[in-house]
Amino acid sequence: MPGSPFLVLGVLLFVYILNFADRVLLGVMAVPIKEDLGLSDTELGLLGGTAFALFYATLGVPIAWLADRKSRSWIITIALATWSGFTALCAAAVSFPQLFLARLGVGVGEAGGVAPSYSLIADYFPPGQRARALGFYSFGIPIGSAVGLAFGGLMATAFDWRTAFLTMGLLGITIAPVFKFIVRDPVRGGLDVKKSRSPSPVKFNVRETASVLKSKPSFWLLSLGSAMSATASYGITFWIPSFYVRSFSLSLADVSLIYASLILVGGLAGTWIGANLGDKFGPQRPAAYVLIPVVALLVSVPFFVGAVSTGNLYLSLSLLAVPTALGGMGYGTILTAIQHIVPPALRSTGSSIFLLINNLIGLGLGSLILGVISDAMTQQYGSESLRYALLCGSSFYVVGALLFFLASRKVAADWELAR
């Protein structure tokens, strides 16, 4: 029998925190890793996104297909143990190829963590609570990012970057059996039907899945919009610590704690406000789920440009707090829209395809694109090249907002429960 929805949600959140903490460790420790292994910004960009995303994005689809048919809790348990083991192995790397392969392994493990979790949450909480439940789960992004930043910066300063990877990896391996003991699989789609009916055990083959998703243009617009937004957010999150070290001469420990605080407070506030707005307006007007991040992204851009352009540290950090908070407002709402656009029996698979597009482009290219731009501008701007690379990265927020706006005009017609 499945356990308490709120206990399960809490455990899923904790695992998601570990998931994101493992991702951002490399970014906050980019400075000592670059010095230790003699890497360029382009190589760091490859490690920060591409190495992780190659298998994380592509393997997510077949794993989610399996999760729509087999135990989701077992899949997440195995995924947690796998990515944690490879995180620990990062500590043993002594060259770029070795660290690249270890990051590939982290991506392989994390491919099985998120999409099955979305599906579990949708089956533990009724439609009117899903934006808040998925928003609460999305707290894992700011909390995990903050934990990874603070933990990585402090451990790298007190010990070294290898100790940080090893400690975080061993923690995840220890948690894996506890997760399996607590989290069970509920009935798929059991909360999407009237109590007088039994949930339909419909299963879709590959051709039927493709046909369903092909008929829903909002799904693809949301996926591409999220990918553009993620290109900016992943790239910025990876490079911001290095930017403050290079351009403002802050210590790694100071940067990690300051930026972790901004992400934690701003990210939690933005995510929760967006999720509550989604549950308030979305059930009556599905487009509201998508218009919330449109407004948030467009308002974010001028504040981010100001934060990166100014030479005043305190003004820069104050301005950066605004996009840090607004960037999380779409986490719960976009995920809720995706869960309702596809039928219950396709939620893991639909989520994985959404994540495939989002992560292959956003996570895979975000830090790499900014690293390449920074290297290209180094001869002209020296240590300030990263400032201009970050400014270029903010343009992806505008493209993402435009795609979300187009999706908002289609989402009501594609809403599965409206049928």
Image: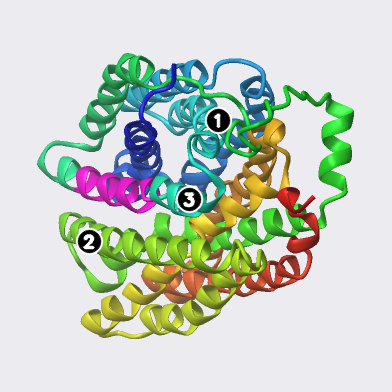
Q: Quadrant of residue 5?
A: top left
Q: Which mark is residue 129?
A: 3
Q: CA distance from mark 1 to mark 2?
A: 29 Å
Instruction: Name the side, left or right, on which 205 lies relative to 47.
Output: right
Q: Nearer the viewer, residue 161 or 6?
A: 6
- Image x and y of residue 24, in percent: 37, 46
Q: From where the camera sits, is residue 3 visible?
A: yes
Looking at the rendered structure, the kind of residue marked 2 is: Ser
Q: Residue at x 58, y 52 (%)?
A: 336
- Residue, disc 2: 261
Query: In terms of secondary structure, what is the magenta stretch mainly?
Result: helix
The kind of residue tagged 3 is: Gln
- Find out whether residue 288 is within the magenta segment: no
Mark drawn on residue 116: 1
- Residue count near mark 1 (Cα–Cα under 10 Å), binned few <14, some 14–19, many ≥20: many
Mark closest to the chain's N terminus, 1 or 2: 1
Figure check: 57 above or below 150: above
Magenta residues (range): 139-153
